[in-house]
Image (tube, rainbow, N blue to C red):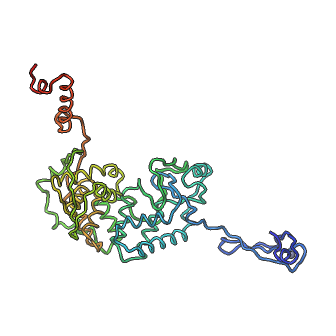
Amino acid sequence: MDCPKCLVLTGESRKLTVTETRRSSDGSSTRRARKCPKFDSHVFWTTEAFETPALSNLGVQRWLDGRVIGRFDRDLLAQDVRLSVAGLMSEPDVEGVVENACRRISAKLPSLLQTISRDDQLFLDNSPAAGADGIILDRQILLEVERAFDDIGHNRVAALLYSMAHRGAPAEDSFGAAAPKDDLPEPLPSYDPASRPSYGDDPEPHTLRGGSDLLHWIDARYPQLKALKDLEDPQADRGPRPWQDWLVMPEDFWPDRRLSYPKEVLKSNRTRVPFRMRNLRHSLERAVVTNPDLQGKVPELAEWVVSHVQGQAVVKSSQLATFAMDVLRKTDDLSYLRFAFIQKNYTHISECGPEIVGLIRYPSRRLRFIPQEPSALHPGNVQMVEQAAKQLSQWLGGYRAITSGQP
Ligand SMILES: [Zn+2]
């Protein structure tokens, strides 16, 4: 480091020498006195401290499997919050949550940064977060976003929708980092799924697998609601029901590519729009974010919905929403509950408890999708056989001869 005074006055560069070193009381910074070799009056103090990495210089590691899925990206995090709360929050509130979350993460960064070994570093350099200054776990981001929702305070249903979207199924968590699905890097070598780092001070279960988990989680997070009391109320339980045996029988559904689609959808404001299968699929995709297994089944879910409005040229949007709710209730608890909270316009979290209890007490029959298998009886195949017969009869010189069985 050159003497700045000499540099300005004479243009000559003279190396300063350190004459004194002092550490700050918390050890986070060091001050040094530096003296010019030519003029004793040229004395300067400098302060050295470690730089906190910018959030955008951090890689995000999945808690589930130790893979580094990308750089932390504030815009993606905002988009994720926006989609998770499904319009229940104003844009300034969404921004407020993201701002608070980023501030919280920055403040806690020294304790949130994961230690990486030399081997890890080699893997990190080949990951989508190459060149990152450090890595943090996606679950730590989730935790800080949840707390940021608490800072905003007034919209617990939105906070619940966010938590459900991310605690439902850890496999597809994104938490602000872009996660290329097909091309994930190897997990960092030091990452041991059997001894995953804990959530820090998070006392709640990490993963919600169904309605019962969710109810316990709400009870732990908002004890004043006494969410579990409905479940424990013996008065409310009317004992075994005659159809309970029948409930364990799954409902089979054969997806059918020859479904007739409605022509138009009548919306709640009495306007009509053309029916689009892709719009229905899109809503269902948004609903099943909690369940990676179900994400591949969206086309079948959509067909189940359409199969229930067969032959109706005009359907009400509420009909589609009802069947969409039904098909989710038959396939995945958390996806159903998230969708139902939104569709039923629950504005207070105390309304969510009874819906969950109802799902536990009165589950829907599970839906089982049967893959389409070639069968002579299937109408599609009958048509194919007829067509082949016509073709054959043309070659043989008479359609009638073949179909009537006469020589
Ligand atoms: Zn000098």
Task: Determine the residue located farthest toward the top in the rendered image.
Answer: 407
Task: Give coordinates of residue 392: x percent, y percent.
Answer: 20, 26
Residue 287 sits in quarter: bottom left
> For the N terminus, which image quadrant?
bottom right
Say whether residue 42 is left or right of residue 268. Answer: right
- Pick whichever, 280 or 15, lies toward us: 280
| Furthest residue in direction right, as rendered | 38
Please tell me which residue lies in front, 57 or 390.
390
List x then y, in percent, for residue 46.
75, 74
User: Is 147 on the left-hand or right-hand side of 10?
Assistant: left
Quadrant in the picture for the C terminus = top left
The residue sitting at the bottom extreme is 41
Image: 301 above or below 165: above
Quadrant for ligand 1 reads bottom right
- Counting labels gives 0
Residue at horizontal 41 percent and vertical 66 percent from the top: 81
Image: 210 above or below 405: below
Image quarter of residue 224: bottom left
Q: At 32% across and 60% down in the image, what residue appears?
A: 213
Q: Nearer the viewer, residue 139 or 226?
A: 139
x, y percent for residue 371:
26, 41
Location of residue 58 in the rendering, given as x and y in whole percent from the top left corner: 56, 61
